[in-house]
Image (cartoon, rainbow, N blue to C red):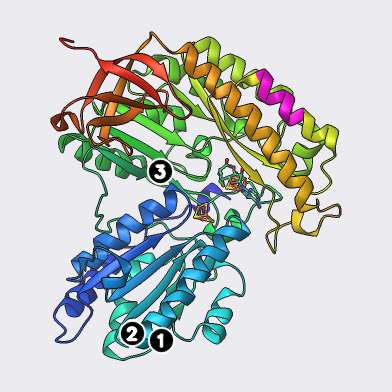
Amino acid sequence: MNKRDMILPIPPAEIDAQMAYADQFAALAERPQTYFIVTYGCQMNAHDSEKLAGTLERMGLTAAPCKEEADFVLHNTCCIRDNAERKALGNVTWLKEIKKQRPHLLIGICGCMVQEPGMAETLLRRYPFVDVAFGTGNIHRLPEFLLKAVEKRQRVIAVPEEQSTLIEGLPIKRESSFQNYVTIMYGCNNFCSYCIVPYVRGRERSRNPKDILKEIENLQKQGVQEIMLLGQNVNSYGNDNSFGVTFPQLLHEIGKTGIPRVRFMTSHPKDLSDELIEEMAVNPALCHHFHLPVQSGNNRILDMMNRRYTREIYLDRVRKLRAAVPDIGISTDLIVAFPGETETEFEDTLALSNEVRWDSAFTFIYSPRVGTKAATLPGQIDPDVASRRIEKLIHQQDQITQEIFQSLIGTKVNVLVSGHARRDETELTGKSERNISVNFRGTQDLIGHIVPVQITAASKTTLRGEIIKGE
Ligand code: SAH
Ligand code: SF4
Ligand code: F3S
């Protein structure tokens, strides 16, 4: 995008107008009183749901304990792979039956899936029980949409063609009081050939660094211990505007706010600069964890994926990161069975996993997405072959993760305590800087604090340890 065409946030007056609708809605004699949001997909969606919840509470609704008890159920959908989409549509359809028993139930659907080409028409025709549908680019208009649906009893299907908006100033109901998301940019320009995100989230739009810093300063004042900076490709932050602040510079400024821990995701290997690596080494707020999706270990497949780096470039970035930050933990995303992937090409991914030794990897079977380039490629892989490949990859990665966990026994880590362990109420759990779950015995009052823990054992998915007293 031309820097002169930079995107400005939606004017504050427009947000004020929506808040006026919110007040109007709150004053209605008959209206939904409770809401429940079902969230699918990535952290972007989770954070959008926090904004939607903030807006709904501003409209006078309160959170219901489960969707069965809510007057308004909103599905914030994902369409990254076919199963994500099927799950969302299945759950929306299930509500149709509930609506027969409770006719006043209001059903909403939003998020990436709604933004898919043709989806608005499908919803209109095939899902007549959906009352409100809107896209990722107009979540700020929820008060207006709900008012119309409730007061005028009209269906609202409002999906913007373009998601070129930058939304500032919405109320946010944050899930946690000590671990928060902060969006630094929206959208994606990369058009990896398999991926739907650029189509449903629009082009890259970076937030004004002043707005980001103000938000983080406020969180720091409230005692927040950790923030996760969000964007589809955070290291291209600033490329689309003329604020003159790059991602490493932004991290530097964020470090000065005094927030104890900073994480970010996701980084694209092609944009991982030496400056960013340098900043990782010197900025004490940055957690020693790097999520660096590689997708494939084979150069032909990487080229077909339009990733714009090679296996060698990826390995070079990993080497540099580890040289600068020796105790860094690196994780990745991997796709198997991309169209045309041969057995030998898949083995290159297996070999890369042995060479890099990621702490962990999210592994996916390629899922064709209508409208993307890869969906039209010849050589779609047989599902049985794909399953066998992913199982082999998962098995190998599990073993590597185990070996890494074992090597951490005896070390001291700092853990941000997030709550009780799932399997044992007397245990606490939290994440180390390296983003590994650590369980240990401790008292409830430690939740929300960063504590030093000595690692004593490792299980399949977590480390175990003992709190170090007197530090
Ligand atoms: N912006 C991030 C990731 C976004 S989606 C990045 O570029 O790394 C998260 C992961 O889902 C991707 O890294 C990829 O591994 C996977 N993914 C995306 N589209 C997919 C598809 N069509 N089929 C299977 N996996 C996919
Ligand atoms: Fe999708 Fe690629 Fe953009 Fe990530 S960088 S969101 S995988 S197009
Ligand atoms: Fe899914 Fe949208 Fe995230 S498609 S993975 S929710 S950006």
Point out residue 450 in the picture as x, y percentages from the top left corner: 24, 24
What is the span of residues highlighted in magenta in the rendered image?
348-355
On the question of residue 459 being in view, the answer is yes
C-alpha span from label 2 to label 3: 32 Å
| Residue carrying label 1 | 155
Label 3: element kind: loop
Identified by mark 2, the residue type is: Ala
**What label sits on residue 184 in the rendered view?**
3
Identified by mark 3, the residue type is: Ile
**N-terminal label among 2 and 3:** 2
Point out residue 59 in the picture as x, y percentages from the top left corner: 20, 71
Q: Residues within 10 Å of mark 2 (few under 14, many from 20)?
A: some
Task: Please tell me how many numbered marks the rendered image carries.
Answer: 3
The quadrant of the image that shows the C terminus is top left
**N-terminal label among 2 and 1:** 2
Point out residue 364 in the picture as x, y percentages from the top left corner: 63, 44
Measuring 37% from the left and 69% from the top, which residue is drawn there? 74
Specify the quadrant of the image occupied by residue 9.
Answer: bottom left
| Residue carrying label 2 | 149
41 left or right of 442? right
**Which residue is more in the foreground, 326 or 219?**
326
Circles 2 and 1: CB atoms closer than 8 Å: yes
Identified by mark 1, the residue type is: Arg
C-alpha span from label 1 to label 3: 33 Å
Measuring 78% from the left and 35% from the top, which residue is drawn there? 346
Circles 1 and 3: CB atoms closer than 8 Å: no
Measuring 20% from the left and 33% from the top, which residue is drawn there? 447
Measuring 45% from the left and 75% from the top, which residue is drawn there? 94
